[in-house]
Amino acid sequence: MIPTEDASARKRVIEDKLKQEQETLSFIRESLEKSDQLTKGMVSILSSFESRLMQLENSIIPVHKQTENLQRLQENVDKTLSCMDHVISYYHVAKDTDKIIREGPAGRLDEYLACIAKIQKAVEYFQDNNPDSPELNTVKARFEKGKELLEAEFRSLLTRYSKPVPPVLILDAIGGDEDMEVQEDVTLEHLPEAVLQDIICISAWLVEYGRNQDFMNVYFQVRSSQLDRSIKGLKEHFRKNSASSAIHSPAVQTKRKETPTKKPPKRPGKDDALDIEIDSYIHCISAFVKLAQSEYALLTEIIPEHHQKKTFDSLIQEALDNLMLEGDNIVSAARRAIMRHDYSAVLTIFPILRHLKQTKPDFDATLQGTAASTKNKLPALITSMETIGAKALEEFADSIKNDPDKEYNMPKDGTVHELTSNAILFLQQLLDFQETAGAMLASQENSSSASSYSSEFSRRLLSTYIYKVLGNLQLNLSNKAKVYEDPALRAVFLHNNYNYILKSLEKSELIQLVAVTHKKVESSYRELIELEIQNYQRSWLKVTEHLTERNFPAFQPGAKLKDKERQIIKDKFKGFNEGLEELCKIQKGWAVPDKEQRDAIRQAQKRVVSDAYKAFLQRCANILFTKNPEKYLRYAPEQVEEMIDKLFDTSA
């Protein structure tokens, strides 16, 4: 059982809690009632607000739409005014641009082009909107005037600033420093950069808007004149400096096969003025290629691409034609020289032809895209030079064979004939142009191998040619020698000429060149030389024959000689003395220019004569054949040797 006091206490507690709960519930009910009242009030306010908003919207929307319409109208008005201003501006273009157009584009190209752009737009406007208006004619005329002045400015700038390239710059461009392993590429500046940019700008405008190609004609005419003047200036430079030897060597002469650093060789009668002309022409050819390349580079910046080749073709014609004409004149001069039988004159063609052929690849590359008639000019000149050169070579060989045997033209002392020295000099000079001369000969061959000849084929042709000339020379010398009545002088003459030919062949590369096709040429000449020495030595037989035992009287030692026997010995002495004196007197005036050969001939003759004379004196030593021995014993053996030592010596 729970005690009564505890139950009462718990009951009081429960009653207190119940009372609190009832109070809380009562508070919540009151709060809910207040909330409902507030909600009803808020709903009422919102309903009132919504009603007012609807009224406001109904009032504002018409106003807003009206405002939008007004704004649109305002914009249309602004646009209309702007268009009106724009249109009105076209009517003022002629007046606004008059001063600038009249004054021209000089010094203010950008402003001028902007001005023309305005005029152009005005033209387009009137053409589209009012083609019958007088304003169209006005702006059209103004546009044409502006274009005219631009064309005039193009011509003016080009003419004023286009100057011939100075010769020194051209020489630097085509020559450079030959000692340098790498050649520096010299750039030729034809126009100042600012001027060039203005010209490019005008050109671009004339192409795009001017629809006129006349400026291209102006361009090639002005630049053509400068190109030609540059080359003529170089030529004049060579004339003025003809006395100077410090002239650049041709650029194309570097790294070539034909010992190009040698200058064109001297020929008989060749003067320095001709050397200068040859050197000048060679340099002008190189200059043309370099300047033409430079002109093309400049042209590509100014002339539209599809007009570049044609304009370039026209631009180079004058200078190219002048060079080709000069080349033709050289060929004509060579042809006239051949007609005069002056074959050495044709040597002027060799350095030029070699240079033309070496330059041809660069020439062809530079003229790529030009007309066929332009491209064919250099090959035609080369062919012409090869033809006349080959003709000269062949006629020279024939002239050596057919040179007349004129007695008055023969050397009295039997020395080297002028024909021999000239022939050898001519052949030696061909050595500097072996490939060129060989190609000349090959160009005239009709065989299939000639059409695609190699350098070896050309070399063999040249070798055969030189051998032919030498053969013709030998035949002619043999005929000329017959002019001499004295067989000994004939032998000395042939010996001197054959010896000169052999020594000349050995001193130069001619011997190796001839040996390409005729390996025994050296031994052949040595045999000829030895044969003529033997022929010469026969002249002494009429001296030494008196010293032989033939007809010498046979007698016993101590026996008295008969008159007839004494006379035989006297005649032998007399014949020897007179023969010795006569030969020494005659042969002293003859010549053997080669000291080595001269000494050898004297030595051999001394040995033969002296030995025979000593033996003869030995036989006559104890014979009393005369009361006046000094009359017959005129010379001691030593004196005889001294006399022979003075042979071929006019100063003795």
Image (spheres, helix red, strand yellow):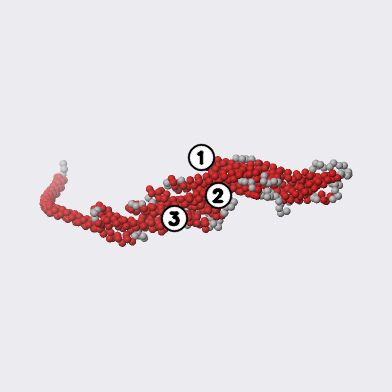
Q: Earlier in the sequence, mark 2 or mark 1?
A: 2
Figure quadrant of residue 66: bottom left
Q: Earlier in the sequence, mark 3 or mark 2?
A: 3
Number of the label disc, if any, that sits on residue 337 = 2
User: What is the count of numbered marks?
Assistant: 3
Q: Secondary structure at mark 1?
A: helix
Q: Is residue 594 left or right of residue 174?
A: right
Q: Secondary structure at mark 3?
A: helix
Figure quadrant of residue 71: bottom left
In the image, what residue occupies the spot 42% across and 58% down?
161
Q: Earlier in the sequence, mark 1 or mark 3?
A: 3
How many other residues sit within 10 Å of disc 3, few (<14), some (14-19) or many (≥20)? Answer: many
Number of the label disc, if any, that sits on residue 226 = 3
In the image, what residue occupies the spot 54% across and 44% down?
390
The amino acid type of the residue labelled 1 equals Ser
Residue 521 visible somewhere in the drawing: yes
What residue would you read off at disc 1?
451
Could you say which is closer to the camera, residue 20 or residue 218? 218
In the image, what residue occupies the spot 44% across and 46% down?
373
How many other residues sit within 10 Å of disc 2, few (<14), some (14-19) or many (≥20)? Answer: some
Q: Secondary structure at mark 2?
A: helix
Provide residue 157's location: percent of width, then percent of height: 39, 58
Q: Quadrant of the N terminus?
A: top left
The amino acid type of the residue labelled 2 equals Ala
Quote the CA–CA distance across marks 1 and 3: 40 Å
Provide residue 559's location: percent of width, then percent of height: 88, 43
Which of labels 3 and 2 is toward the front? 2
Provide residue 377's location: percent of width, then percent of height: 46, 47
Quote the CA–CA distance across marks 3 and 2: 35 Å
